[in-house]
């Protein structure tokens, strides 16, 4: 399970936390992998997409699940 805390000070959107089941986290990683292979992201989008990928991956603790 992933808990995401998100706040934007200067904008209207404010989400304190989102609980995401692990299977949806894996789905997010798979979608990013597939779409990146297909060239769906522009260079300007690489960093935020990569940050999302790394955040989800680290919070899923996939390496620990494999053991």
Image (spheres, rainbow, N blue to C red):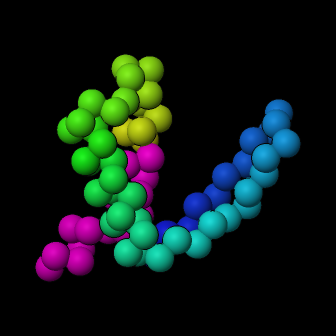
Secondary structure character of the magenta stretch overall: helix
Q: Residue at x 38, y 75 (%)?
A: 23
Q: Residue at x 43, y 52 (%)?
A: 55
> Does residue 58 appear in this view?
no
Q: Quadrant of residue 11?
A: top right
Q: Quadrant of residue 64?
A: bottom left
Q: Give the image location of residue 15, x and y in percent.
A: 73, 57
Q: How many marks?
A: 0
63 is within the stretch colored magenta: yes
Q: Give the image location of residue 7, x and y in percent.
A: 73, 48
Q: With respect to residue 49, does 6 lie above or below?
A: below
Q: Residue furthest top?
A: 43
Nearest the viewer among 42 and 54 is 42
Nearest the viewer among 27 and 55 is 27
Q: With respect to residue 67, does 36 lie above or below?
A: above
Left-right relation of 5 to 52: right
Q: Residue at x 26, y 48 (%)?
A: 33
Q: Give the image location of residue 22, x and y in percent.
A: 40, 75
Q: Magenta residues, as a range?
A: 52-67
Left-right relation of 4 to 32: right
Left-right relation of 19 to 65: right
> Does residue 10 appear in this view?
yes
Q: Quadrant of residue 41?
A: top left
28 is within the stretch colored magenta: no
Q: With respect to residue 58, does 44 lie above or below?
A: above
Nearest the viewer among 48 and 67 is 48
Q: With respect to residue 3, does 15 lie above or below?
A: above
Quarter the C terminus occupies: bottom left
Q: Residue at x 23, y 36 (%)?
A: 38
């Amino acid at each position: 399970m992933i808990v995401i805390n998100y706040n934007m000070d200067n904008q209207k959107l404010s989400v304190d936390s989102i609980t995401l089941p692990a299977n949806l986290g894996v789905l997010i990683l798979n979608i990013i992998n597939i779409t990146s292979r297909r060239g769906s992201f522009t260079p300007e989008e690489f960093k935020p997409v990569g940050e999302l990928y790394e955040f989800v991956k680290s919070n899923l603790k996939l390496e620990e699940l494999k053991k």
